[in-house]
Amino acid sequence: MKKLVIDQKTLKENIEKIKNYAPKLDNNEEYTIIGIVKGNGYGLDLIKYSKFLINSGIKMLAVATVEEALELRRNDIKVDILMLSTINSKEELQELVEKDILITIGSTKSAQLANEIAEEGHNIRAHIKIDTGFGRYGFIYDDYRTIVETIEHLNKNIQIEGIYSHFSISYYKNNKCTKEQFNRFINLIEVLETNNIKIKMKHICNSPAFLNYPNMHLNAARIGSAFLGRVNAEVDIGLKKLGEFQVNIAEIKTVPKGFNISYANAYKTKRKTQIAIIPFGYGEGFNIGPRQDMFRKIDKIRNLYRSIKSLFKKEKLTVRINGKNYDIIGTLGMYHAIIDITDSDINMNDIVEININPLYLDRKIRREYI
């Protein structure tokens, strides 16, 4: 038995805390929280998670791939869905339009394709993406003429419902780059409005920015990791972590003193030891996280410092059984981990509970909402 357990009560509480943190807008306008469900719903199951968000009052979702958007529609998800990536394939773009997915227009090429599809009689709903300093999708923020002319020359069947950008480093409060990106975005909006281009929905905050920079909330925000309580931000509003993996012990046995455990003889028993084998490892997402792939000298120095510091700090991976923590001994395998259970009352098939980020958990493992 392997499953990821999602506590519905905790998830619901996180959603409500985020709603309560959102600003109250003028003119009885409702603040829009866009639920980001990319990456298999941040690991909580794309369809189950999306339906839970909708049932909790989230009226708009966003995805990163065409496949995710279409899967939502196939499963009778009827709320607005925003495709966050610029699509430069006419075939894929047309498929999204036919399923009433809000597309992103972030280049003259994507605008040209949207115009071609609109000229064929399709109604298109879209958001404009602005690159304020992330270096990914979107018009460069100060290319005012291109942005204005592109919007002005869009087919009458294309309705621009929103405009957005994405922060590159909003994990920290009072960050100079974040403030600069926000100001660039606001300046562009002012230019557009000077040219009589008014766009109703404006969003730039992701989860960490939503928490750290309430002055940048605008009238919508994109929330992903915060719903799971796994957001990297300095402001704490009491969110709780979601994601408990459960698996049964596969085997229990006793090994002698001086016996090697796991690859590279990483651990040697100091006494006659009872061990339990847990059928779970890094191949299914345990102890996996984002790569350290930053290339700035300061980032390399920080990573080196953390690596050296870890040499002198005893770090352990633990699991919980019957309310007690047990250390994993030896090296973590692809599909197995070993723990020392000497002098415990643990039995075969006892449930092992493991705290894990659902985003990295193998999609084939069952998700169970309780």
Image: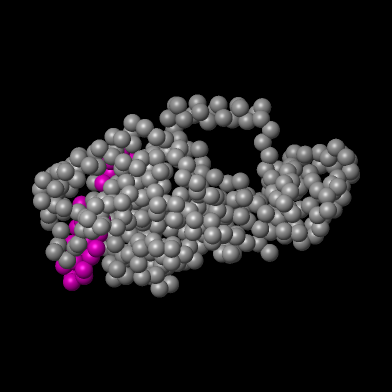
Q: Is residue 181 left or right of residue 227?
A: left
Q: Position of residue 125 (x, y in %)?
A: 24, 63
User: Which quadrant of the figure contains the C terminus?
Assistant: bottom right
What is the quadrant of residue 316 in the picture? Answer: top right
Q: In this rendering, would 260 be left or right of 172?
A: right
Q: Is residue 26 above or below residue 135?
A: below
Residue 256 drawn in magenta:
no
Question: Which quadrant of the figure contains the N terminus?
Answer: bottom right
The quarter of the picture where residue 94 lies is bottom left
Q: Residue furthest left?
A: 195
Q: Nearer the viewer, residue 361 or 170?
A: 170
Q: Is residue 36 visible?
A: yes
Q: Is residue 190 above or below residue 348?
A: above
- Tell which of 235 and 355 is nearer to you: 235
Q: Residue at x 45, y 37 (%)?
A: 234
Task: Tell me where residue 176 sits by quadrant.
Answer: top left
Question: Residue 270: horizontal and vertical position, in percent?
Answer: 85, 37
Going 76% across and 47% down the picture, which residue do you hit? Answer: 339
| Along the viewing direction, whichever of 95 and 249 lies nearer the viewer | 249
> Residue 15, percent across and down?
45, 56
Which residue occupies 61% across, 46% down? Answer: 287
Q: Which residue occupies 36% across, 40% down? A: 213
Magenta part of the chain: 108-136
Which percent across, then down, holds residue 290?
51, 44
How does the figure colour the protein chain or chains? one colour
Does 123 lie within the magenta span? yes
| Residue 146 in sight here | no
